[in-house]
Image: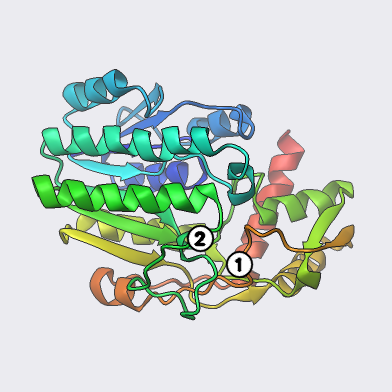
Amino acid sequence: MAYLITGGAGFIGSHLAQQLLNRGETVVILDNFNDFYSPALKRYNVQRLNDGTQLTAIEGDIRDKACIQRIFAEHEITHVAHMAAMANVRNSIKNTPLYTEVNVNGSVNLLEAASENGVQQMVMASTGSVYGKTAVIPFVETDNADRPLASYPATKRAMELMAHTYHNLTGLNVSVLRFFNVYGPAGRPDMMPMRLLNAAFDGTEIPLYDNGNMQRDWTYIDDTVNGILAALAQPVGYEIFNMGYGQPVSLSDFIDIIEELTGKRINLRPTPAPASEPPITFCDNSKARNILRFNPQVGVADGLKATWEWFRDYKKQA
């Protein structure tokens, strides 16, 4: 078997690659190392992988159809973990064409290649942001998810629908995983956990939305990767799974934990929440528990402690 991980130099993709390599699997990672956040961090992610002879790292773009077709032809891909995307809700607001090109058109290139090459199982990374300001709390997969608040979740929802189309027309097995606020070591620097750790480190001012009352369902990276591995191992036709811890935490409590870990007060500026931000993300993960045996283990206090320890060591090396 050979596993293709798109976005394999990124946060989730590189952690997934490491676990597959630890199992002795053949792994191909595809990443364009763009500058949305530090390419140096992405190259660090690749360098830390235990590669041996089982890893092939390719610098390329999912929008490049010829590149995608070449990878499938040369590496006999049997499983695909599609983690590559333009992410970040707020950044998507003024960049809708780019997000559409990458998240929709790039995903179609992968769906096309996977269908043509008889891939056994494809897992696609989506987001809990597709639910928007739903009245259904906690979020459940049967929700229509048809009122996205920004371009990022809109393009992810479009990707989900295209995946169903390919399943319907070609029989491709596709599991769509809606991730919830993933954090952990080597996390994306544009996301709130790393922004807060950096702010504790250097005093950078951080906007405090809605007086810290917003709630997020923080999910530790190891739990997320275990969920992806379970989905890769179990073709179930076309299904959507929520993949989150299932216990929202207020932003103010999240900040309190970081301040206690770091021994620093974070410079906060009270700010109204942008229109792109729902007041809560809250994952009903019962479907993933029942079908995939998804069983998240790491609570936010332990997860942030591990993240802070990695961050502190990484800063010493930088």
Q: Which residue occupies 48% across, 76% down?
A: 246
- State the quadrant of the N terminus: top left
Quarter assignment of residue 229 = bottom left
Q: Which residue occupies 69% across, 49% down?
A: 311
Q: Position of residue 126 (x, y in %)?
A: 41, 54
Mark 2 secondary-structure assignment: helix
Q: Residue furthest front?
A: 147
Q: Marks 1 and 2: in contact by CB < 8 Å?
A: yes
Q: Is residue 266 above or below residue 165?
A: below
Q: Position of residue 91 (x, y in %)?
A: 63, 43
Colouring style? rainbow
Q: Which residue occupies 24% across, 39% down?
A: 111
Q: Which residue is mark 2?
A: 129
Q: Which residue is mark 1?
A: 278
Observer-nearest residue: 98 or 10?
98
Q: In the image, is 70 to the left or to the right of 22?
A: left
Q: Position of residue 146 (x, y in %)?
A: 41, 62
Observer-nearest residue: 175 or 149?
149
- State the quadrant of the C terminus: top right
Quarter assignment of residue 281 = bottom right
